[in-house]
Amino acid sequence: MVMNAVVTHENHAEVLTFLREAVRDRRTVGAVAPSGRALAEVLTAPVRDRPAQPLTVLEVGAGTGSVTRALLGHMPTGSNLDIIEANPRFAARLRRLVDTRDPLTSAAATAEIHEMLLSRFATERRYDVIVSGLPMTNFEPGEVNDIMARLVELLHPEGTLTYFAYVGTRAARRLVSAPAQARRHDAVEAVLQAWRAAHTARRRTVWANLPPAHVWHLRSALRGLADRPAA
Ligand SMILES: C[S@@+](CC[C@H](N)C(=O)[O-])C[C@H]1O[C@@H](n2cnc3c(N)ncnc32)[C@H](O)[C@@H]1O
């Protein structure tokens, strides 16, 4: 996995920072390498798929900023990006990334780092696009339900919520983890499945990432019905 990151990320310092934090706190970081470019492109597709009008965008669990960079590169002029990251070392990197970005992207969109847990984030804003990098399958089912409820609450009624999970982790956990861990993972998947069922959900699989990842894009089910052509 680290090999992949080294091959796809020119920035070795970023990969090392990520790995160091993953060793320090495996549960919360939930990966050993940042998302590669192909995964970042699919995660940020909802920004590109929208008309070129100012957007409110929220990224949760930004890590070292591989998805943040893709978001900043695609946001239409007049947009705003809020970035929530709980890890102080990642947050410091993200501040540098935002402060030293290309003048063209900084002119296009404002960006603010919120160094905190998602549960502490208070805002009246509603977002057109939310991208979550949170490692849901490392959490308890109740925590995941609370996270999804909060993300859906923060979403504009016509917005898109995107999250991802690595392919095969559930099967791997059944093979190598204690039965309680495998049961917890199954319960988390059931919670996520219920949220997908309550929305219009599209899944894409990104094989060009190590590990490969499933990406889910969720939109309001009512919006999905409105999108359908009249019979
Ligand atoms: C799997 S990493 C994803 C990093 C990045 N988005 C990427 O794709 O490379 C998960 C990130 O979520 C952060 N995180 C985990 N739980 C969080 C929470 N409750 N609130 C905010 N950030 C959290 C971790 O510190 C970590 O940076």
Image (cartoon, rainbow, N blue to C red):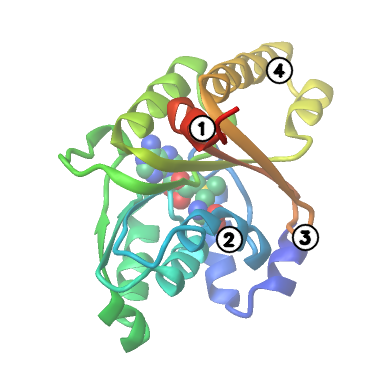
Q: Nearer the viewer, mark 2 or mark 1?
A: 1
Query: Residue 131: which numbered mark, if any?
Result: none
Marks 4 and 3, Cα distance to the nearest angstrom? 26 Å
Percent of width and height locating residue 156: 31, 39
According to the picture, the residue beneath numbered tag 1 turns out to be: 224
Percent of width and height locating residue 198: 51, 19
Secondary structure at badge 3 equals loop
Q: How many neighbours does mark 2 have within 10 angstroms: few (below 14), some (14-19), or many (20 or more)?
A: many
Q: Nearer the viewer, mark 4 or mark 3?
A: 3
According to the picture, the residue beneath numbered tag 4 turns out to be: 182
Is residue 19 placed above or below 158 in the rendered structure? below
Q: How many marks?
A: 4
Which residue is the extreme one toward the front?
231
Closer-to-camera residue (211/58): 58
According to the picture, the residue beneath numbered tag 2 turns out to be: 40
Q: Nearer the viewer, mark 4 or mark 1?
A: 1
Q: Is 140 placed left or right of 80 in the picture?
A: right
Q: Is residue 24 visible?
A: no
Q: Nearer the viewer, mark 2 or mark 4?
A: 2
> Under 8 Å from ligand 1: the CB of mark 2?
yes
Q: How many neighbours does mark 4 have within 10 angstroms: few (below 14), some (14-19), or many (20 or more)?
A: some
Q: Earlier in the sequence, mark 4 or mark 3?
A: 4
Marks 2 and 3, Cα distance to the nearest angstrom? 11 Å
Query: Residue shown at 50%/63% (left/top)?
Result: 48
**Tag 3: residue type?**
Ala
Which residue is the extreme one toward the bottom?
103
Secondary structure at badge 2 equals helix
Q: Quadrant of the C terminus?
A: top right
According to the picture, the residue beneath numbered tag 3 turns out to be: 208
Marks 2 and 1, Cα distance to the nearest angstrom? 24 Å
Percent of width and height locating residue 197: 57, 20
Closer-to-camera residue (189/171): 189
